[in-house]
Protein backbone atom coordinates (compact mmCIF):
# COMPACT_ATOMS: atom_id res chain seq x y z
CA UNK A 1 0.00 0.00 0.00
CA UNK A 2 1.32 3.45 -0.94
CA UNK A 3 2.16 5.96 1.78
CA UNK A 4 -0.37 8.73 2.34
CA UNK A 5 -0.41 12.36 3.36
CA UNK A 6 -3.18 14.43 4.95
CA UNK A 7 -4.93 16.63 2.38
CA UNK A 8 -7.37 19.49 2.89
CA UNK A 9 -8.96 21.50 0.09
CA UNK A 10 -10.45 24.70 1.51
CA UNK A 11 -12.56 27.41 -0.12
CA UNK A 12 -14.45 30.40 1.27
CA UNK A 13 -17.53 28.14 1.26
CA UNK A 14 -15.86 25.55 3.50
CA UNK A 15 -13.97 22.27 3.28
CA UNK A 16 -14.27 20.59 -0.12
CA UNK A 17 -12.10 17.60 0.76
CA UNK A 18 -10.34 16.36 3.89
CA UNK A 19 -8.63 13.01 4.19
CA UNK A 20 -5.68 10.83 3.23
CA UNK A 21 -4.25 10.85 -0.29
CA UNK A 22 -1.34 9.06 -1.96
CA UNK A 23 -0.77 11.66 -4.67
CA UNK A 24 -2.19 14.73 -6.32
CA UNK A 25 -1.66 16.74 -9.48
CA UNK A 26 -2.30 20.48 -9.52
CA UNK A 27 -1.83 23.33 -11.99
CA UNK A 28 0.82 25.82 -10.87
CA UNK A 29 2.04 28.97 -12.58
CA UNK A 30 4.50 27.00 -14.74
CA UNK A 31 2.30 23.97 -15.47
CA UNK A 32 1.07 20.87 -13.72
CA UNK A 33 3.07 19.30 -10.89
CA UNK A 34 2.64 16.35 -8.55
CA UNK A 35 2.83 15.80 -4.81
CA UNK A 36 3.54 12.50 -3.04
CA UNK A 37 3.85 11.58 0.63
CA UNK A 38 6.70 13.32 2.48
CA UNK A 39 7.02 16.01 -0.21
CA UNK A 40 9.58 18.69 0.50
CA UNK A 41 8.08 21.85 2.05
CA UNK A 42 6.53 24.01 -0.65
CA UNK A 43 4.30 27.04 -1.08
CA UNK A 44 3.12 27.68 -4.64
CA UNK A 45 0.45 29.65 -6.47
CA UNK A 46 -2.26 27.70 -8.30
CA UNK A 47 -3.87 28.65 -11.59
CA UNK A 48 -7.43 27.64 -12.39
CA UNK A 49 -7.55 24.08 -13.70
CA UNK A 50 -8.05 20.46 -12.83
CA UNK A 51 -6.82 18.93 -9.60
CA UNK A 52 -6.51 15.15 -9.35
CA UNK A 53 -6.44 13.40 -5.97
CA UNK A 54 -5.55 9.68 -5.73
CA UNK A 55 -6.52 7.75 -2.61
CA UNK A 56 -4.92 4.65 -1.09
CA UNK A 57 -6.91 2.28 -3.30
CA UNK A 58 -5.74 4.04 -6.48
CA UNK A 59 -9.10 5.74 -7.14
CA UNK A 60 -8.79 9.16 -8.78
CA UNK A 61 -11.12 12.02 -7.88
CA UNK A 62 -11.07 15.18 -9.98
CA UNK A 63 -11.86 18.75 -8.97
CA UNK A 64 -12.16 21.97 -10.94
CA UNK A 65 -10.17 24.47 -8.86
CA UNK A 66 -9.86 28.23 -9.13
CA UNK A 67 -6.91 30.43 -8.25
CA UNK A 68 -5.26 29.76 -4.93
CA UNK A 69 -2.20 28.44 -3.14
CA UNK A 70 -0.87 25.06 -2.10
CA UNK A 71 1.27 24.43 0.96
CA UNK A 72 3.10 21.20 1.80
CA UNK A 73 4.85 20.60 5.13
CA UNK A 74 5.19 17.75 7.65
CA UNK A 75 3.33 15.29 5.36
CA UNK A 76 0.30 17.59 5.21
CA UNK A 77 -1.01 19.44 2.17
CA UNK A 78 -3.37 22.40 2.32
CA UNK A 79 -4.96 23.87 -0.78
CA UNK A 80 -6.66 27.24 -0.40
CA UNK A 81 -8.67 28.13 -3.51
CA UNK A 82 -11.35 30.63 -4.41
CA UNK A 83 -13.51 27.64 -5.47
CA UNK A 84 -13.20 23.85 -5.83
CA UNK A 85 -15.90 21.59 -7.21
CA UNK A 86 -15.92 17.89 -8.08
CA UNK A 87 -15.61 17.35 -11.83
CA UNK A 88 -14.96 14.66 -14.37
CA UNK A 89 -11.49 13.91 -15.69
CA UNK A 90 -10.34 16.28 -18.43
CA UNK A 91 -10.54 15.10 -22.03
CA UNK A 92 -7.69 12.77 -22.93
CA UNK A 93 -7.30 11.28 -19.45
Image (spheres, rainbow, N blue to C red):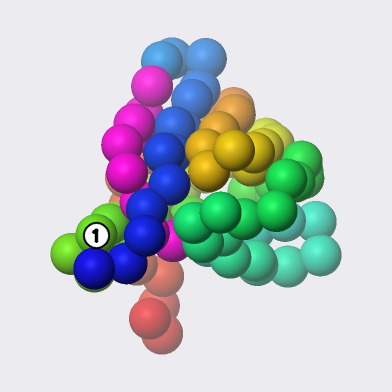
Q: Determine if the magenta segment contains residue 70.
A: no
Residue 57's quadrant in the figure? bottom left
Residue 51 position within the rendered picture, expressed as x and y whole percent measured from the top left: 48, 55
Please give the name of the residue rendered at 41% of the width and 70% of the height, measured from the top-left corner.
90
Horizontally, residue 13 falls left or right of residue 33, namely left
Q: For label 1, count other residues whose C-alpha is less than 10 Å away and answer few (under 14), some (14-19) or many (20+).
A: some
Vertical comparison of 71 with 14: above or below: below
Horizontally, residue 52 falls left or right of residue 26, namely left
Vertical comparison of 21 with 74: above or below: below
Vertical comparison of 48 with 66: above or below: below
The furthest residue to the left: 57
Residue 93's quadrant in the figure? bottom left
Please give the name of the residue rendered at 76% of the width and 41% of the height, measured from the top-left corner.
43
Q: Is residue 29 visible?
A: yes
Q: Is residue 59 visible?
A: no
Residue 82 position within the rendered picture, expressed as x and y whole percent measured from the top left: 59, 27
Please give the name of the residue rendered at 24% of the width and 68% of the height, measured from the top-left corner.
1
Give the mark count.
1
Please give the name of the residue rendered at 41% of the width and 85% of the height, measured from the top-left corner.
92
Q: From which residue to which does the magenta span run?
A: 15-24
> Which residue does the numbered mark 1 point to in the structure image?
56
What secondary structure prevails in the magenta region?
A: strand
Residue 25 position within the rendered picture, expressed as x and y whole percent measured from the top left: 52, 62
Amino acid sequence: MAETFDLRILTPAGITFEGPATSLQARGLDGYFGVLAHHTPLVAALRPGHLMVRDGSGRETWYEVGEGVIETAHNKVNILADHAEPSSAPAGR
